[in-house]
Image (spheres, rainbow, N blue to C red):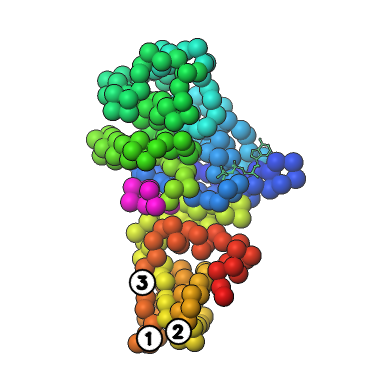
């Protein structure tokens, strides 16, 4: 019961956003969808959710097309910045509307979450602050009976305490009731320990598609005197570099050469997800500014 995105192309006017993009979203997994501003993350989530139709390519759930397919689309929920709610409706009415649209809704959990976040169920949607609108949408996303939940910038406008509550609740609800979450966010450090698998979208394609632990296991920072670092990383996949004082760092993705002796002057550590992402998606101009 997975979702397959195959050869999806999307352009707006003459600007290509997604080009022959492929990926598979499996059941019961927490994904991170990472990409620079304008990379096409929202476009991709909108295409999978039928909010926009791709120029070409297919989106299927177990070989069944998801295009205009109520059965498959009913198993999916997209939380995004787009406002689908009437300003006059009260929060509790909106929960009922969602229950009607999706066939059911976990009212007990929604009330518990509202209490935890301090959201008054009697408030009209239009009176909610930016942060509380996000909180309302998050509560809906966690309480709808969907198997695939897409969270496009889920913590937009949330303060640090509310972000922490959200991450905790996400982990708890996922462990009690596994389903798939795809989280698109720029706060990579905050989700690095939550997501199991990442997609990195860059240059119109998915450039990384893998389990976080596997990806980080083959991502390295090699630091030391410039000549030694350059000699050691020669021929490896160097995705970025920094230089500070006499110390040079080369960032390597894709493994080291086990037969190559490591000079005493050189230190090798694993990269974290954020540092890996920054180096993978740096433009040449940006990368040049890191080197003295
Ligand atoms: N309806 C539209 N009409 C024209 N251009 C669009 C439309 N939707 C998106 N775009 C363009 O497509 C590109 C990708 O936008 P998208 O919102 O998918 O990126 P994103 O990765 O979600 O970005 P961000 O992280 O900044 O939210 C951008 O250049 C955007 O301006």
Q: Give me the disc on residue 269.
A: 3
The quadrant the N terminus occupies is top left
Q: 272 above or below 72?
A: below
Would you say 290 lies left or right of 176 here? right
Q: Are marks 2 and 3 in contact (CB under 8 Å)?
A: no
Q: Are marks 2 and 1 in contact (CB under 8 Å)?
A: yes
SS at mark 3?
A: strand
The image quadrant where one finds ligand 1 is: top right
**What percent of the width, then of the height, locates residue 166?**
34, 36
Q: Which residue is identified by label 2?
A: 225
Q: Which residue is identified by label 1?
A: 265
Q: Residue at x 31, y 36 (%)?
A: 165
Q: Which residues are magenta?
A: 189-198
Q: Residues within 10 Å of mark 1 (few under 14, many from 20)?
A: few
SS at mark 1?
A: loop
Q: CA distance from mark 1 to mark 3?
A: 13 Å
In front of the other: label 2 or label 3?
A: 2
The quadrant the C terminus occupies is bottom right
Q: Nearer the viewer, residue 118 or 54?
A: 118
Q: Residues within 10 Å of mark 2 (few under 14, many from 20)?
A: some
Mark closer to the chain start, 2 or 3: 2
Q: Nearer the viewer, residue 47 or 285?
A: 285
Q: Residues within 10 Å of mark 3 (few under 14, many from 20)?
A: few
Q: 12 above or below 79?
A: below
Q: Let me know if residue 193 is in the magenta part.
A: yes
Q: CA distance from mark 2 to mark 3?
A: 15 Å
Q: Nearer the viewer, residue 250 or 144?
A: 250
Q: CA distance from mark 2 to mark 1?
A: 7 Å
């Amino acid at each position: 019961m997975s979702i397959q995105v195959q050869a999806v192309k999307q352009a707006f006017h003459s600007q290509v956003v997604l080009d022959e993009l492929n990926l598979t979203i499996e059941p019961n997994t927490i994904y991170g969808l990472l990409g620079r501003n304008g990379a096409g993350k929202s476009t991709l989530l909108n295409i999978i959710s039928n909010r926009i139709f791709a120029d070409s390519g297919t989106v299927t759930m177990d070989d069944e097309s998801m295009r205009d397919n109520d059965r498959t689309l009913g198993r999916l929920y997209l939380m995004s910045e787009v406002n689908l709610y009437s300003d006059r409706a009260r929060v509790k009415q909106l929960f009922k509307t969602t229950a009607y649209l999706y066939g059911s809704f976990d009212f007990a959990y929604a009330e518990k979450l509202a209490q935890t976040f301090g959201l008054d169920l009697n408030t009209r949607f239009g009176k909610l602050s930016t942060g509380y609108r996000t909180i309302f949408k998050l509560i809906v996303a966690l309480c709808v009976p969907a198997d695939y939940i897409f969270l496009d910038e889920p913590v937009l406008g949330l303060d640090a305490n509310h972000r922490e509550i959200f991450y905790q609740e996400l982990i708890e609800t996922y462990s009690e009731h596994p389903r798939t979450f795809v989280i698109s966010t720029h706060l990579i450090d905050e989700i690095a320990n939550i997501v199991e698998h990442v997609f990195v979208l860059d240059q119109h394609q998915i450039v990384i598609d893998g389990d976080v632990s596997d990806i980080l296991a083959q991502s390295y920072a090699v630091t030391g005197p410039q000549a030694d670092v350059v000699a050691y990383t020669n021929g490896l996949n160097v995705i970025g570099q920094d230089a500070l004082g006499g110390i040079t760092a080369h960032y390597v993705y894709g493994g080291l050469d086990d037969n190559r002796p490591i000079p005493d002057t050189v230190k090798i550590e694993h990269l974290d997800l954020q540092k890996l992402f920054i180096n993978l998606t740096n433009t040449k101009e940006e990368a040049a500014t890191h080197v003295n």
